[in-house]
Structure formats: C-alpha cells, structure tokens
Amino acid sequence: MSALAMNETLAIARLGQRGDGVAEAADGQVFVPFALPGETVRAVRDGDRAQIVEILTPSASRIAAICPLFTRCGGCAAQHMGEGLYAEWKRQQVVTALSRAGITTDVAPLVDAHGAGRRRVTFHARRDENGMRVGFMAAKTHDLIEVEACPVLAPGLARAPAVAKLLANRLRASNKPLDIQLTASEAGLDVDIRGHGPAGDSLRRQLTEAAERLDLARLAMHGEIIVERRAPLQLMGKAAVTPAPGGFLQATAEGEATLSRLVLAAVPKAKRVADLFAGCGPFSVRLAERAQVSAYESEKAAILALSRAVNHTQGLKPVTAEARDLFRRPLLEHELNAFDAVVLDPPRAGAEAQIRRLAASQVPVIAYVSCDAGSFARDAALLVAGGYALERVTPVDQFRYSAHIELVGVFRKSAGRK
C-alpha cells in the first residue's frame, strides 16, 4: 500500500493526557501528536497513532512554536498551544484524575510557575563516528537531537550545552553513553555526570582541570564530588542550601516558591509540622520560620544538606531531620498525632503506605504536594475514605510546554471522624 493510500482525514475532538490530539475513528480513538481540538488534519495512520501530513483546518488556538527543534526534540509537547487552551488542558488533567477516583472538589485555575525558566537540565551524550553528540532525545525514540540552546532554560544555564559538550569530549574514550546534569546555582554551574563509572586518578585530574577552565562551582561523577570550587547554593527562604550532587530540586525557582506559598497558606496556625519526603528542605526551612519542624527523608545526603543549612540560618524555630525510608517504615498513627499538620511531597509513584497511616491518624490538616495527578488521586481517595475532606487543589505549572503538572492538595480531618 502506498503512503498516499494510507492517508486519512481526521477531525480532532480533544487533547489527550500527553498533549496529543484525539480523533474518534470508526475503529476507536486515534492519537495525533501536535494536533489541536477543532482541527481537521490529513494524517498517516499506524494503528491508534497518526502523524500529521497537512493541517486542513487550523485551530484558532494554534500559535507559532518558540523553538526550531519543536516536534523533533522530545522535551516539549505543547509549544503550539495558545495560552487559554494550554492552561485548561493542564488543569483538566487534574480534574480527570480526581473524577476517575470518585472525588469532586474545587480545582483552582493553573498557576504559572515557569519564572525565569528551568534551573536544571540533563543532556545525553553519545559517541558516533564523528565524535561526541550531545543533546536531548527525540519524542518516543532513542534518537539524539543535538541542542545548542534551549529557550525554556533559566539564564544561568545559557552555556550549559557548550559545557556539556566539552565534558563529554573529555570522557569520549570510555565509549559509554553519558547523562550530564547541570544545575544553575548562586555560585555558578553545578554538574553531575552519570554513566561513565568510577573515575581514576588521571581522569579526576583532567576533570578538575576542566572544572577550573569552565569555571564550574562543583563537578561530580555519580554523586561523588570530583571538585567543589564554590558551594553551589540554592536560596530557600532565609536559608542557603547546598544540595547533594544530583539531589532533587524543583524544576524552577519560581515553582519551588509557588509550591511553598501554597503549603504555608494551608497550615497557617500549625506549631508542630512534619515534613515527609522533605528532600533538602525547601518546605522545612520556610515552615521553620514560624513552626517547629520534623523532617523525614530517605536520602541521607539530602538530610545532611538540610541540617547544615538549618545550622547556618538564624531566625528559625527548631528543626529535626531524620533519614527514614517512608515506603518501608512510614510514620505510624501515634507519631503522626503529635503534629498539628503534615506536609508531604513524595516521588511520582505517590506514598500509599504512608497515606494509609495518615488516613487512620488524627492530624488536623495535610498539605500534599504531588508531581503526578494519577497517584495523587489514588492517595486522595484513601484519605477521603479515612475521614478527610479534600478542600481544594491548585495545579502548578513549572514544566512549561511539557505534559507534566504539579499540584498542591489541602486535606482537613472531617469533624466527628475518629
């Protein structure tokens, strides 16, 4: 069958969760990347997927992309969406997830938290016959798209592609695929390289020399510091935190600040707060400006970073920080009941074991920060079944143009439920 004979005309009805246009065909749904609701497109179809050949009737919400690599690079899914459509698409992801879990609550409009841009980026490096190629992966493939600049990055990462390229070339003899993570800090670039394996003495000297030449704040490999020329500080409220190499950070500084404001607004009168999955402490240090905080996090390096920051910050109430695996050893009801409020920000999979304990507790208010609407909805249903009311949910967008969405949900123990 010829390519022309495979073409179909499709009417796009809505957007899917990943940003694809969805058409209703006689044999089921067809997903069309980069198509918008209301558009009619001619496309080449393969099963339930199709690729646009021509847009016959464009949507009024279609806008020009800001990056020439859009549709090739896999980093962005939505540069073609107008502001109103984009915001409602992201908000609707949360509404749909909650609806599927049988939960009805107020879902606020999307909060834009892109700010100055993403402060962390990971470049992939692969060797071919022409040397090291450095860039991002294409959508749904392992093809590498070389990148010289990225418009969604913060100004502090402007030279990140060039730095990644130089470091990749220093390591080309290994013939290994590399992931080079660069983070913008108050002191400059903080770099962690993964995939190479341990560095011997000779390579460590070469990398130290490269860090000097590139004026890096810190250079690490697999989380092990090769050289720290300046502490790569991140400002969090009153505190200056030095995260562990490659340690978790919110994608944007504005995103972290926005999530923190929502968390603080949820627990305004709490005197004792538990911060679960606390990371290096972006919520803990801000909460400690007015409440006593007990922070729990499985990564010992993150707990150490938080403790050091607290010890060097004046004007905070007491903060205790404990390394504890909350998946294997969640806080129990009698421990939870000692707090006026609980804040949690678990990984994408959610926190089912800890949530079951929270559902059985008497904690008055819970502020749940999530990066996955589906796992949040599952956990929310458990809390509601345990006597909590989900008062409100606020979607937060710090991964602009991607399908990712953050949110903050506020739960309060219903009166009379024990």
Image (spheres, grey):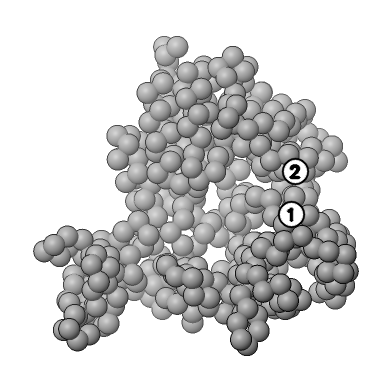
Extreme residue toward the left, this view: 26
Q: Residue 256 at x, y = what percent?
A: 61, 49
Vertical position of residue 375 compared to residue 83: above or below: above
Which numbered tag is attached to residue 310?
none
How many residues crowd around disc 2 within 10 Å: few (fewer than 14), some, or many (20 or more)?
A: some
Label 1 with label 2: CB-CB less than 8 Å: yes
| Residue 175 makes an appearance in the image | yes
Q: Is disc 1 placed on a helix, strand or loop?
A: loop
Vertical position of residue 377 compared to residue 293: above or below: below
Which image quadrant is residue 120 in?
bottom right
| Residue 254 makes an appearance in the image | no
> Going 35% across and 36% down the picture, which residue do you hit?
105
Q: Residue 99 at x, y = what percent?
A: 30, 40
Q: Earlier in the sequence, mark 1 or mark 2?
A: 1
Task: Give whichever of 116, 278 is nearer the camera.
Answer: 278
Q: Is disc 2 placed on a helix, strand or loop?
A: helix
Vertical position of residue 1 compared to residue 289: above or below: below
> Going 31% across and 59% down the picture, which residue do you hit?
16
> In what quadrant of the picture does the N terminus appear?
bottom left
How many residues crowd around disc 1 within 10 Å: few (fewer than 14), some, or many (20 or more)?
A: some
Amino acid type assigned to the residue bearing label 2 in the image: Ala
| Direction from residue 411 to residue 46 in the image, left or right | left
Q: Residue 14 at x, y = what percent?
A: 25, 61
Which image quadrant is residue 260 in?
top right
* Picture mark count: 2
Q: Residue 23 at x, y = what percent?
A: 21, 65
Amino acid type assigned to the residue bearing label 1 in the image: Gly
Q: CA distance from mark 1 to mark 2?
A: 10 Å
Identify the residue under disc 2.
301
> Going 54% across and 43% down the picture, which residue do you hit?
347
> Going 56% across and 32% down the picture, which residue do you hit?
327
Identify the residue under disc 1.
223
